[in-house]
Structure formats: C-alpha cells, structure tokens
Amino acid sequence: MKIIWIDNKPNITIREFFRVREESQGFPKIFKELSSYLIADYLLSTEDEILRRIQVSKWKSRENISKELNENNIYILLNRETKEVYFGETKKSLSKRYPVKQKHHSFDEWTEYCIIQLPPETSEHSRLLVERILIAAGSKLFPNILYNDKPVLDLGIGLTLKNKKK
C-alpha cells in the first residue's frame, strides 16, 4: 500500500506485491465456500427479511459431509439409485451429526444430501416442527412402510420415504 498526500488529502494506491499459488494455499476457495452465507446481507437485514431468506444448498455427494459446519439445519438425504429419501433436522452441523465413519440409524445407503439452513434464532421446537411437516408431507407423496396411506406417487416413478417416525 502506498499513501501520497495531495492537497492534504490521502491518495491511496494498493498493489499486490506477491501472490501465493492457489495449490499451496490452505483454503484456496474460502470465499466460494462462505459466499452462499451472505453474512453482510444477513447483518443488514431486518428480522422479517432474515426469516424469509433460508439458504438451500445444492445436492452434494456424501464424501463432502465433513465440510459442513453450519448449525441449525433441516437436511434431506437421498439415494437416487434406490429411489429413497430421508428428511431430518439437527441443531449440530451435519459433519458432527453424521461423522464419516458413523452409520445412519435408518438409512445408511444415502449417497447425496441437501441442507436447508435455518436462521440462527430458530428454536429447537420450530426446527422439529419443520422436520415433522416434511415427513408428514413426504408420507402423503411417497410410499413408506410405516404409513398406511396410499401415496400420490407410486414406487415405480417416485421415491420411498425412509423416515421411521412421524
């Protein structure tokens, strides 16, 4: 950085003096990873605006789960090949909820996941309510061994809901 005073006003020039090669950086794509959170947008928003803006991730491969650090989430686990889906909630981050070596209690065959990040102020009661709503809606759409209702989508064209609780 170079500062030159002209007429009692600073004239600031900022230049890059050296560049660290991307492959030698510890976190080369940190902005890409954090940009979806939009922290400045969050900090400048009103409560109503924050509640209307939930962050929904793209579908990600199971191998990426260790990178998930955001807490207070609704998540969807999916296996496209077997056409199975699972809805869940967690106060913890998904990386802590499902460590790489840990088996899932009712759906260990999942291969992809999607996260719906809730606003930080979302209570445990509200998070559980959203999960139950998703499971109830899923049970109306997809076949499930625990529900006797005839689903809208049959097994041939739809998914099977893997949740074992209402």
Image (tube, rainbow, N blue to C red):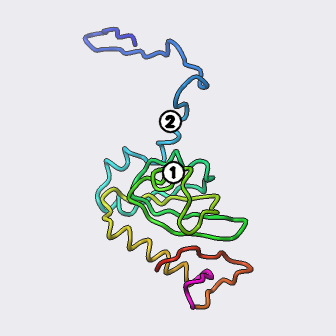
Q: Residue at x 32, y 47 (%)?
A: 43
In this image, 90 relative to 66: left or right?
left
The part of the image, by quadrant, that contains residue 14 is top left
- Residue 97's place in the image compared with 67, above or below, is below
SS at circle 1: loop
Q: What's the distance in space between the residues labelled 1 and 2, CA to CA?
A: 22 Å
Labelled disc at residue 30: 2
Where residue 138 appears, as percent x and y from the top left, is 55, 78
Amino acid type of the residue tagged 1 in the rendering: Pro
Residue carrying label 1 = 99
**What's under tag 2, amino acid-wise?**
Ile
Q: Residues within 10 Å of mark 2 (few under 14, many from 20)?
A: few
Residue under the point 46% across and 56% down: 97
Residue 120, horizontal then vertical, whole percent: 33, 56
Q: Quadrant of residue 23?
A: top right
Q: Quadrant of the N terminus?
A: top left
Question: Looking at the image, is mark 1 or mark 2 nearer the viewer?
Answer: 1
Looking at the image, is 163 positioned above or below residue 50? Answer: below
Say whether disc 1 or disc 2 marks the residue closer to the N-terminus. 2
Q: Residue at x 63, y 82 (%)?
A: 143
Measured as percent of width and height from the top left, residue 10 is found at 30, 14
**Magenta stretch bounds:** 141-148
On the picture, is 5 further left or further right than 66? left
Q: Please, is residue 115 above or below residue 15 in the view?
A: below
The residue closer to the viewer here, 101 or 62, is 101
